Amino acid sequence: MKATSIVSALLLAGVSSAQTPAGFTPAVTEKLEVTFGTKSIATGGQSMTKAETARQPTIGIPVPANGTYLYMLIDLDASTNFANPKQGQQATYLHTVLRDFKGNGAPSAAGITTLTTTATGPVSWFGPAPPAENPPHPHRYTNLLWAQPANWQIPAAANTMLQNQKLGFNVTNFIAAAGLPNPIFANYFNVTG
């Protein structure tokens, strides 16, 4: 009985430390601070509305920002049939990829370094917009942040994926094509159409 309790506690600790949804690859354990206006994503899977998430969020990391970062937003629960979602298959949809984020000043009193960028691409901000569905179900919007290598240029194959393969987007294939390591910070929230 005691061994079962220990195993259960360890499993719960592992689940609670994940900043990406269960089953998402690559799993990320470090939290990306994501704030829409004045509303922060406190816990993974927090419910938000389309109106609340219409504008690009402020993002931050719980460490000093000593480099440049690449940000991505994906919807893990899009449908291959936008007109009639129930008739399609579940697929990942790429919403946004913004490069060249850097630390903006000293960390806050809570130790969070805000990141900013003047870049509008390679894939400009496109906020969550799940269609109305019956029955309604939440879409998991996953925020990912990479350390962007110095002098990084998007390889042609990765750029093609960003521009032409938004529906059915595969993060693992993008990482390989872009020559990036796994993301280092993440967070996710839910929006229901």
Image (spheres, rainbow, N blue to C red):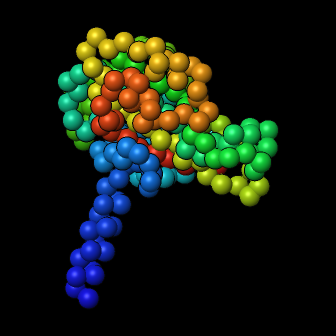
**What is the quadrant of residue 174 in the picture?**
top left
For the point 52% across and 23% down, the residue is 161
Position of 158 compared to 49: left or right?
left
Classify 90 as above or below 168: below
Q: Position of residue 123 (x, y in %)?
A: 52, 20
What is the total number of numbered labels drawn onto the structure image? 0
The residue nearer to you, when weighing 188 against 25, is: 25
Q: Position of residue 109 (x, y in %)?
A: 22, 38
Q: Position of residue 143 (x, y in %)?
A: 44, 37
Position of 12 compared to 127: left or right?
left
Q: Is residue 27 visible?
A: yes
| Residue at the bottom extreme, as displayed | 1
For the point 47% across and 18% down, the residue is 157
Q: Is residue 60 visible?
A: no
The image quadrant where one finds the N terminus is bottom left
For the point 65% across and 37% down, the residue is 129
Classify 61 as above or below 69: below
**What is the quadrant of residue 7 in the picture?**
bottom left
Q: Position of residue 118 (x, y in %)?
A: 42, 13
Classify 9 as above or below 159: below
